[in-house]
Image: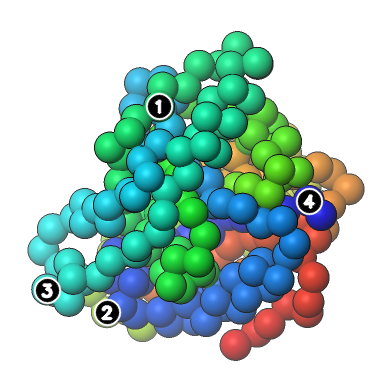
């Protein structure tokens, strides 16, 4: 069975300790994923590993990287002890090379918080090997969609393609209270993107700066691009399931999407 592609919002690092609405919903999705036959590994693309060109983590035991500062001490004690997937990394590199896209293998790359924080909810206990693909600094929206298309064959090989970003990400308007009332512009932007995602309107997703309040929702594009990678790895005839994770800190939408068939009824926790 073809493994779905996912986009998840990882929000702020404190999401690891404050699951809110999104955490239980991700866990419900993860339980359905683990019921799939042939699921071998997770390939994560996060906006927190930016490089010139593509790089692939090929560590046999990637470290849990606490790539942030100024947060409560318990956050730094968290570990996500997933095994690495060096053999899968070789497969991914070979797949990309056949399309003329080189990817450098990095044998000491850990998992940044854009990878391990959502995985703590999606797949608690680290039941699957995990490897990370960098987000190139030169990548633009159309390039991200095209990269997803190149990665799509991995879904037939038992690899979960996981784009991790944030559906909105304006830290200039971040409020310190997790339950702050959502800003109105966040909902308008999210509804526009949701319509485009569930209808496979790739042209709209690429031309996303035409969405209402796009500059306010994303002053920069790095937390949006993983959505395009996940969408690019799907096809127009596949269902899209919305993971409604709500809004935290007033401005961080935790919405996510499942691209493809996932057995079991969607769970609203």
Report the residue marked by disc 1. Answer: 105
Which comes sooner in the sequence, label 4 or label 3?
A: 4
In the picture of the structure, the residue carrying the numbered disc 2 is: 177
Q: Which of the numbered marks, if any, corresponds to residue 2? A: 4
Which residue is painted at 68% across and 82% down in the image? 267
Name the side, left or right, on which 179 lies relative to 235: left
Q: CA distance from mark 1 to mark 2?
A: 40 Å
**CB atoms of marks 3 and 2 within 8 Å:** no
Do labels 4 and 3 touch, CB within 8 Å? no
Q: Earlier in the sequence, mark 4 or mark 2?
A: 4
Quadrant containing the N terminus in the rendered view:
bottom right
Residue 232 against residue 93 in the figure, above or below = below
216 left or right of 7?
A: left
Q: Which quarter of the rendering shows the C terminus? A: bottom right
- Closer to the observer: label 3 or label 2? 3
Query: How far across and down, in percent of the image, does residue 94 sit?
Result: 59, 22
Front residue of 44/189: it is 44
Residue at 76%, 43% in the rendered image: 156
Instruction: Kindly state the secondary structure of the residue where label 2 is placed.
Output: loop
Mark toward the start of the polypeptide (4 vs 1): 4
Q: Earlier in the sequence, mark 3 or mark 2?
A: 3
Give the distance between the C-alpha atoms of the residues marked 4 and 2, in whole angstroms: 40 Å
Left or right: residue 154 compared with residue 177: right
Q: How far apart are the two marked residues, 4 and 3, measured between alpha carbons?
A: 40 Å
Residue displayed at 46% across by 73% down: 124
Residue position for label 3: 73
């Amino acid at each position: 069975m073809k493994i779905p592609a996912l986009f998840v919002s990882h929000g702020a690092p404190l999401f690891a300790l404050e699951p809110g609405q999104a955490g239980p919903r991700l866990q419900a999705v993860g339980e359905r994923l683990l019921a799939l036959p042939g699921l071998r590994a997770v390939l994560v693309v996060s906006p927190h590993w930016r490089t010139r060109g593509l790089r692939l983590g090929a560590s046999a035991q990637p470290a849990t990287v606490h790539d942030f500062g100024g947060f409560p001490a318990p956050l730094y004690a968290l570990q996500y002890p997933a095994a690495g997937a060096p053999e899968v990394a070789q497969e991914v590199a070979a797949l990309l090379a056949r399309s003329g896209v080189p990817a450098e293998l990095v044998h000491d790359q850990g998992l940044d918080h854009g990878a391990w924080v959502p995985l703590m909810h999606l797949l608690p206990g680290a039941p699957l090997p995990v490897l990370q693909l960098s987000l190139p600094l030169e990548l633009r929206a159309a390039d991200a969609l095209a990269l997803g298309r190149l990665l799509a064959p991995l879904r037939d090989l038992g690899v979960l393609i996981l784009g991790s970003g944030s559906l909105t990400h304006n830290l200039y308007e971040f409020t310190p209270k997790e339950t702050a009332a959502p800003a109105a512009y966040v909902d308008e932007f999210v509804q526009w993107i949701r319509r485009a995602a569930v209808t496979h309107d790739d042209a709209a997703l690429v031309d996303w700066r035409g969405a209402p309040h796009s500059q306010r929702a994303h002053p920069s594009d790095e937390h949006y691009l993983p959505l395009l990678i996940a969408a690019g790895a799907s096809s127009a005839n596949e269902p899209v399931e919305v993971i409604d994770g709500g809004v935290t800190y007033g401005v961080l939408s935790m919405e996510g999407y499942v691209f493809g068939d996932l057995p079991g009824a969607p769970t609203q926790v």
